[in-house]
Image (tube, helix red, strand yellow):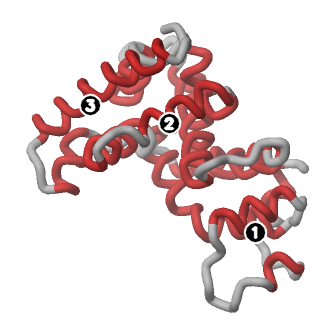
Amino acid sequence: MTNAQIFDLHLPHSDSATKKTKVGEKMTDTQIVDLYLSRSESAIGETAKQYGAYCASIAMNILHNKEDADECVNDAYLKLWNTIPPERPRTFSTYIGRITRNLSLNRYKSKTAGKRGGGDTALLSSELQDCIPDSRQVEDVADNNELSKAIDDFLSTLKENNMVYFIRRYWHMDSPREIAEKFGVSEGKVLMSLVRTRKKMKEYLEKRGIAI
């Protein structure tokens, strides 16, 4: 499947998997993954319908350019098509969020290569490199099955607020101030939570035999 074909897949298709869902009713993540596994062309259309805005938000927070963000979201759909199967993600929303994030970061790095600074996006990458093994794996975490599963398992051990802060910061690329405003807490509380969570994740991964 080419990038050009992605846009065709946004159109509604008639197939048995889609017919199982009533008109106007949202498909579950499991049903969407099943579409990919059965190689149904409705898979990307359903993904765009339910997660297009979510992915666009992640890409825009990194790239701050709509054209670049749109291209990364479409690349994410293509990557989903090419990786499922054989992959069957445990949490589809997290999986596509990671893919969008990593593609956006790669595009950001290629566009800012040779420039000084890098703002908040460079800072985020630097923060994660302190607790996730080597820079290649930081970029390709969605493709690294062992690391991806370990991070999912780690996040499930956290208190809900700490998990949400971490995901909003490193998956959605929200600033600590934005997170604080969304959840009605102080920015200092968010920052402290992120520091402690990164430290805990580093220790957790080391115990799992994933060297930092």
Question: Residue at left 56%, top 37%?
Answer: 104
Q: Horizontally, is 56 left or right of 30 in the view? A: left
Q: Amino acid at mark 2?
A: Asp
Q: Measured along the vertical axis of the image, is residue 3 above or below residue 108?
A: below
Q: CA distance from mark 2 to mark 3?
A: 17 Å
Residue type indicated by callout 1: His
Q: CA distance from mark 3 to mark 1?
A: 37 Å
Q: Is residue 92 in view?
A: yes
Picture quadrant where residue 6 is located: bottom right
Q: CA distance from mark 1 to mark 2?
A: 33 Å
Task: Give the residue at x 89% y 59%.
Answer: 39
Tell me what residue is drawn at x 12 percent, y 38 percent: 189
Q: Secondary structure at mark 1?
A: loop
Tag 1 residue: 10
For label 3, the SS is helix
The crowding category of the residue bearing disc 2, from other C-alpha atoms within 10 Å (few below 14, some 14 to 19, many at least 20), is: few
Q: Residues within 10 Å of mark 3 (few under 14, many from 20)?
A: many
Task: Find the residue positioned furthest to the bottom.
Answer: 23
Question: In this rendering, is residue 164 above or below 6?
Answer: above
User: Disc 2 designates what residue?
Assistant: 153
Residue in front for this viewpoint, 184 or 110: 184
Marks 1/2 in contact by CB < 8 Å: the verdict is: no
At horizontal 89% and vertical 79% (from top left) the residue drawn is 15
- Residue 55 left/right relative to 48: left
Element marked by disc 2? helix
Task: Depth check: give the residue in front, 7 or 16.
Answer: 16
Q: Nearer the viewer, mark 3 or mark 1?
A: 3
Front: mark 1 or 2: 2
Q: Is residue 39 above or below residue 76?
A: below
**Does label 3 or label 1 sit earlier along the sequence?**
1
**Which residue, given by chain and number where applicable, does mark 3 sit on?**
194
Query: Residue lying furthest top in this view?
Result: 211
